[in-house]
Image (cartoon, rainbow, N blue to C red):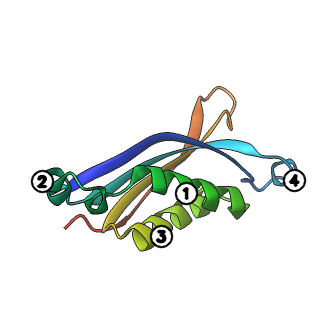
């Protein structure tokens, strides 16, 4: 199984449990790893056999911006489900981080994996 990835997709969104977090957008950074078979795409050089990372990026950005999530765990889970369903991949790893959320830390966040690489 091959992997298509997107790194450091920065999205402004409402995410957090505190009152002030519900009123202002914060930046989250998302990394995605998506399992797929790239052999037919490589053989034919036809994008229809690829996971279109531009479409994934646009779709995930829209989902996150509209979501108004309380927890990054929920955000990551919804992104994973969306990618598996809408982009027909069997496995995805989603890493969501909130830069600057904890003093003296560059970033904090979660990583979820959904589906199977088999």
Total marks shown come to: 4
Q: What element carries label 4?
A: helix
As measured in the structure, the alpha-carbon distance from the residue carrying label 1 to the one carrying label 3 is 11 Å
Q: Position of residue 31 (x, y in %)?
A: 46, 45
The front one of 61 and 97 is 61
Q: Is mark 3 on a helix, strand or loop?
A: helix
Instruction: Kindly identify which residue carries mark 3.
Output: 81
Q: Is residue 2 left or right of residue 99?
A: left
As measured in the structure, the alpha-carbon distance from the residue carrying label 4 to the one carrying label 3 is 27 Å
Give the vertical position of 13 relative to 107 (above or below). below
Quarter occupied by the C terminus: bottom left
Instruction: Kindly identify which residue carries mark 2.
Output: 43
Q: Is mark 2 on a helix, strand or loop?
A: helix
Which tag, 1 or 2, sits closer to the chain's start?
2
Give the vertical position of 39 relative to 82 (above or below). above
Which tag, 4 or 1, sits closer to the chain's start?
4
Q: Would residue 111 be visible to someone looking at this image?
A: no
Q: What residue lies at 60% left-to-right and 53% top-to-bottom?
A: 61
Instruction: Kindly identify which residue carries mark 1.
Output: 60
Classify mark 4: residues with Cα within 10 Å, few (<14), some (14-19) or many (20+).
few
As measured in the structure, the alpha-carbon distance from the residue carrying label 2 to the one carrying label 4 is 52 Å
Q: Position of residue 54 (x, y in %)?
A: 46, 50
Which tag, 2 or 4, sits closer to the chain's start?
4
């Amino acid at each position: 199984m091959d992997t298509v990835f997107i790194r450091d997709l920065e999205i402004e969104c409402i995410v957090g449990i505190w009152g002030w977090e519900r009123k202002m957008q914060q930046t989250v950074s998302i990394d995605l790893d998506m399992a797929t078979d790239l052999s037919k795409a490589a053989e034919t050089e036809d994008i229809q056999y690829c996971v279109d990372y531009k479409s994934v990026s646009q779709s995930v950005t829209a989902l996150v911006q509209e979501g108004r999530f309380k927890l990054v765990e929920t955000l990551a889970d919804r992104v994973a489900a969306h990618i598996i369903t809408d982009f027909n991949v069997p496995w995805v790893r989603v890493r969501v981080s909130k830069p600057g959320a904890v003093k003296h830390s560059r970033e904090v966040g979660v990583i979820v994996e959904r589906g199977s690489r088999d």
